[in-house]
Image: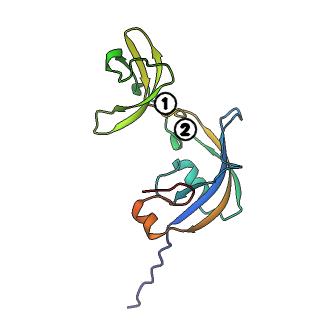
Amino acid sequence: MPSEIQTELAPKVVSFHYTLKDTKGNVLESSFGEEPLHYLEGGGQIIPGLESAIAGLKKGDKKSVAVKAVEAYGEFEQELVVEVPREQIPKPDVEVGDRFHADSGQGHSQVVVVTKVTTTHVTVDGNHPLAGQDLHFDVEITEIRDATEAELEHGHSHAGEGHEH
């Protein structure tokens, strides 16, 4: 019986520049002129819709990508908007726009943003700021390389400035 040959491709670290726009074409963010973004393929470090859309691209490739909200930061979840008594807020001088970590009730914390403040209550929103939005990316792949053992062990790319453990 012939032996089966299995070839397993090493996971890659992909580096790319991007410009992120909303559906009206407004630029929300861009890495051009700065350090590119680096991620370990399959590591969940970038939104799923973008990762699948740029999979298979090569160094130097450019692509425009439309990502639906569900494949980006998810749909807006009204149940993540909560009004709490002001005395439960750790900061006495809380203001709209403040961000802090709140107990999710499931053993981990999540970042929430203050959206409304009254004399008695504070409304916080646990949705990502881009939840519910379809997004558009212009991407340019700057580098693709095999992941190192350390990157595979840690589950993320060690590329870029200022990486420490």
Mark 2: few, some, or many residues within 10 Å (few <14, many ≥20)?
some
| Amino acid type of the residue that numbered disc 1 sits on in the rendered structure | Phe
Place residue 120 in its image quadrant.
top left
Say which residue appears at 55% left-offset and 48% top-offset.
Answer: 49
Say which residue appears at 32% left-offset and 39% top-offset.
Answer: 108
Q: Are marks 1 and 2 in contact (CB under 8 Å)?
A: yes
Element marked by disc 1: loop
Element marked by disc 2: helix
Camera-nearest residue between 141 and 95 = 95
Q: Quadrant of the N terminus?
A: bottom left
Give how far across and how far down residue 34 sits, in percent.
67, 50
**Which residue in the rendered view is the most extreme toward the bottom?**
1
Pick whichever of labels 1 and 2 is earlier in the sequence: 2
Place residue 152 in its image quadrant.
bottom left
Give how far across and how far down residue 140 sits, in percent.
69, 55
| Amino acid type of the residue that numbered disc 2 sits on in the rendered structure | Ala
Mark 1: few, some, or many residues within 10 Å (few <14, many ≥20)?
some
**Which residue in the rendered view is the most extreme toward the top?**
119
Residue at mark 1: 76
Q: Quadrant of the C terminus?
A: bottom left
Please say which color scheme the image uses: rainbow
Q: Left or right of 4: which side holds 33?
A: right
Q: Left or right of 118: which side holds 20?
A: right
Camera-nearest residue between 40 and 50 = 40
Camera-nearest residue between 95 and 45 = 95
Residue at mark 2: 69
What is the number of callouts on the image?
2
Residues at marks 1 and 2, CA–CA distance in whole angstroms: 9 Å
